[in-house]
Amino acid sequence: MKPEESGYINLRIKNMVCDRCIEKVGELLDASGFKVDAVELGHVRVEGENGEWNHLKTNLLEAGFELVEDEARQRVERIKAVLINHINDLQNQTARPDRLSTILTAHIPWHYEGLSRSFKQVTGITIERYFILLKIEKVKELLEYGELTLSQIADRLGYSSSQHLSGQFKKETGVSVSEYRKDGLPERKSLSEVGS
């Protein structure tokens, strides 16, 4: 990795999906001798090349993360981080269910067609398909908590109706919402596993 003109290096880290991940990656960077400027979902900014790269890569892998060095993969990991963050914001009612193109281009300085093309080439699925899979995993999580009605879940995650949510859930999982509530199958995936 080469320092940018400002003396900082921007890194992309795969599988960062929550605040605990941010905290853990920060600890791993510190333990590897890096001076951390900023850590957010999927993205880290460190000062210069002041740490042990091999130590960092090993520690990240052991903790379930991965340093992304390929530019296209970095872009894909950034897309994933933005969408995971958006799903969490929707669940917490701090975001609006905007179009994916609007959400992504607000966070990533790249045209949506290029982002979409890169995502499909690297992952084999479209951004839209990935977002549906993320939403289904979030639906499973909210169903397991049992705190919200299906209509409330549909509203929070930007579905047009509970029927739309139910239909998509059945199509993607092979079971109805009521069957899932009863048996909990198929099992949930972590958001970092979605689309992998």
Image (cartoon, rainbow, N blue to C red):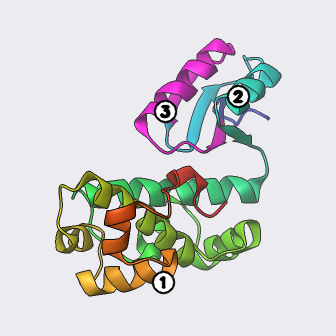
The residue shown at (30%, 69%) is 157
Q: Position of residue 98 (x, y in %)?
A: 34, 74
- Magenta residues span 10-39
Q: Is residue 186 a member of the stretch shown in magenta?
A: no
The residue that label 3 is drawn on is 22
Residue 71 falls in which quadrant of the image? bottom right
Q: Is residue 20 magenta?
A: yes
Which quadrant is the C terminus positioned in?
bottom right
Q: Residue at x 72, y 73 (%)?
A: 124
Q: Position of residue 147 (x, y in %)?
A: 18, 55
| Residue 151 in view here | yes
Residue 90: quarter of image: bottom left
- Nearer-the-camera pick, 129 or 185: 185
Residue type at mark 2: give it: Glu
Q: Nearer the viewer, mark 3 or mark 1?
A: 1
First in sequence: mark 3 vs mark 1? 3
Check disc 1 and report the residue beneath it: 171
Total residue callouts: 3
Q: In the image, is 12 to the left or to the right of 148?
A: right
Query: Could you say where residue 65 lies in the image, as x and y percent from the top left?
Result: 65, 37
**Real-space CA distance between mark 3 and mark 1, rounded to the nearest whole angstrom:** 33 Å
Q: Secondary structure at mark 1?
A: helix
Residue sitting nearer the eye, 38 or 195? 195
